[in-house]
Image (spheres, rainbow, N blue to C red):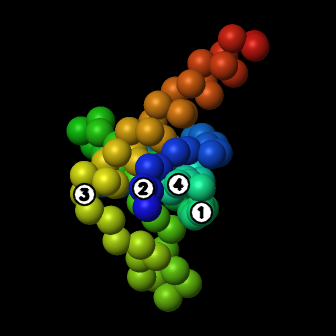
Amino acid sequence: MQLEPRILFIKETGESPSPKGFRRIALFDVAFGSDFTAHDWRLVETPSGGVHAYAPDLKNGTKSADLAPVFRDKIADLAAKALGVKIARTAQRA
């Protein structure tokens, strides 16, 4: 079974950076193939300008998923591209 991720929904958060310089820039849903969708992932900008994707935390504060860094980076790249496309489309309508 191939679990190729794709972004289904993304929403910019417009949050300010934390004291350490990290900033949540979007929330998104990601589908893995046609059989599994994960909701409420976070796209976070790092102080160096990079982006990371994080699965939502559980109610007890633990991670809801652990992914290999290369796979997590792929999801972050897809989300960043989807956010850029969404922002560009919104700007064209204005």
Given this view, does label 1 or label 3 mark the residue nearer the observer? Answer: 1
Left or right, 4 with respect to 72, comes to: right
On the image, numbered disc 4 is attached to which residue? 33
- In the rendered image, residue 94, in percent from the top left (x then y), is placed at 75, 13
On the image, numbered disc 2 is attached to which residue? 2
Q: Quadrant of residue 92?
A: top right
Q: Is residue 44 visible?
A: no
Identify residue type, mark 2. Gln
Circle 3 — which element? helix
Reply above or below: 36 against 47.
Answer: below
- Residue in front for this viewpoint, 72 or 83: 72
- Residue in front for this viewpoint, 72 or 21: 72
Identify residue type, mark 4. Gly
On the image, numbered disc 1 is attached to which residue? 35
Distance from Cα at disc 3 to Cα at disc 2 = 18 Å
Identify residue type, mark 3. Pro
Marked residue nearer the N-terminal end (4 or 3) = 4
Circle 4 — which element? loop
Q: Residue at x 52, y 80 (%)?
A: 58
Distance from Cα at disc 1 to Cα at disc 4 = 6 Å
On the image, numbered disc 3 is attached to which residue? 69
Distance from Cα at disc 1 to Cα at disc 3 = 22 Å
Distance from Cα at disc 4 to Cα at disc 3 = 19 Å
Which quarter of the rendered picture does the N terminus lie within? bottom left
Q: Which mark is residue 43?
A: none
Marked residue nearer the N-terminal end (1 or 2) = 2
Q: Residue at x 34, y 71 (%)?
A: 66
Circle 1 — which element? loop
- In the rendered image, residue 42, in percent from the top left (x then y), is placed at 49, 55
Marked residue nearer the N-terminal end (1 or 3) = 1
